[in-house]
Amino acid sequence: MKYYLIAGERSGDFHAANLMHELRQQDAEAQFRYWGGDMMQAEGGELVRHYQDLAIMGFLEAATSILKFRGYLKQCQQDLLVYKPDVLILVDYAGFNLRMAKIAKDNGIKVFYYISPKIWAWNQGRVEQVKARVDKMFVILPFETEFYQKFNYPVDYAGNPTADAVAEFEPTTDFYERNRLEPDKPIIAVLPGSRKQEIEEMLHEMIAILPGFQEYQFVVAGVTNLDANYYKHFHRNGIRFVFDQTFDLLSHATAALVTSGTATLETALFDVPQIVCYRTSSLSYAIGKMVIKVPYISLVNLIAGREVVRELIQGDFTARNLLDELRTLLTDAPYLARMKAGYAELREKLGQHQAAKKTAELMVGYLRGN
């Protein structure tokens, strides 16, 4: 069968690549065409456009990029209709993908959605769009099943792919040597995100607190989909960078400063104490405050249904607050024990299900009419 996939960011590239691998196990004749990234490309098929071109962060930024966005939509529509796949598989990235879902549905192409858009957080009216445009929804967060049930829309939960990936990960034995790190200094992991916009907002503040923690080494998780020269203006004495080694970094870290996103869940699953950080433009934040319907921004707190990790958002995200909170993480044993107890609850809720494999089995079964 012919599969057309759309993933608009790095985490989507990762999850879509795993799904492609499992789809091929279920369907030996699988052919892939996609908008995605390097990890999907490694699984074969044809990459139409890289997700780097699609990366937009925040309401204001999206508004100022609307012409580019429309151009990509038109290109994607034309390419999809020429390819005529058996199914369009969408991965998160709601603003673009829900529009593509309508185009596919209007042209008789079956639509599957893997990793639900976060419509439970804001604009819940989009559920009606999902019901009208998406044939099958495959969710990765336990509470999403209950959310969709409220709207009489059955979905499939086959597990969480991040939980599976962390459980299967084996740390390398030469991490310190390979990255020229100091073996006797504990690591503070710094995860500033994978898009230039968020890195610019986050990283300067994150590394500003280094002088207060001279007994630790701050190691930044960089990504190779950005030019290595881009990171040069963040270099400071005592700051180290590793690239495309986030899991290895977390497996060796004592604590972490994490930009809100999938990385907060990854950090929790590695049992690393963390501070969740987030800042965007003032206008984007003001709009977000009006429309967002959930009490937390981190997946850790959302899944737990309570505050497990501290979130420093917008005006609270300052070097002073970061410094104070990190000192607490490193010295307050009862505080740390409560966080780790919350992590244990999180792992129990997510379970381990081989999510990509089970999702692929379900998808191919549905396509074959089983």
Image (cartoon, rainbow, N blue to C red):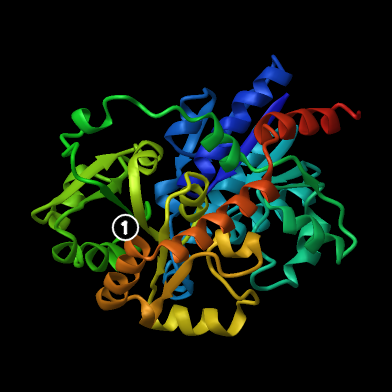
Q: Which residue is mark 1?
A: 196
Q: Tell whether 253 sits left or right of 156.
A: left
Using the rendered view, name the quadrant where residue 22 is placed: top right
**Which residue is pictured at 48% across the width and 49% down the height?**
9
Task: Check disc 1 and report its element: helix, strand or loop.
Answer: helix
Residue 214: name its quadrant: bottom left
Let me know if residue 303 appears in the view: yes
Q: Quadrant of residue 276?
A: bottom left
The answer to whether residue 118 shows anywhere in this view is no
Task: Give the camera-side residue of 93 and 199.
Answer: 199
Foreground residue among 134 and 107: 134
Q: Position of residue 340 (x, y in %)?
A: 52, 55
Report the quarter where the N terminus lies: top right
Residue furthest left as drawn: 237
Does residue 254 appear to the left or right of 169 in the view shown? left
Return the x and y of residue 20 as percentages of the image width and height.
61, 29
Q: How many marks?
A: 1
317 vs 293, nearest the viewer: 317
Name the side, left or right, on which 75 lies relative to 151. left
**Badge 1 amino acid:** Lys
In-front residue for pair 218/235: 218
In the rendering, at what x and y percent does residue 282 appear? 39, 83
Q: Within 10 angstroms of label 1, few (less than 14), some, or many (20 or more) residues?
A: some
What residue sits 62% from the left and 53% below the top? 346
Q: Is residue 354 above or below residue 215?
A: above
Q: In which quadrant will I find the C terminus?
A: top right
Find residue 78 and report its horizontal and vertical position in percent: 60, 44
Residue located at (48% from left, 55% from top): 264
Instruction: Give the residue at the far front of this rendering.
Output: 334
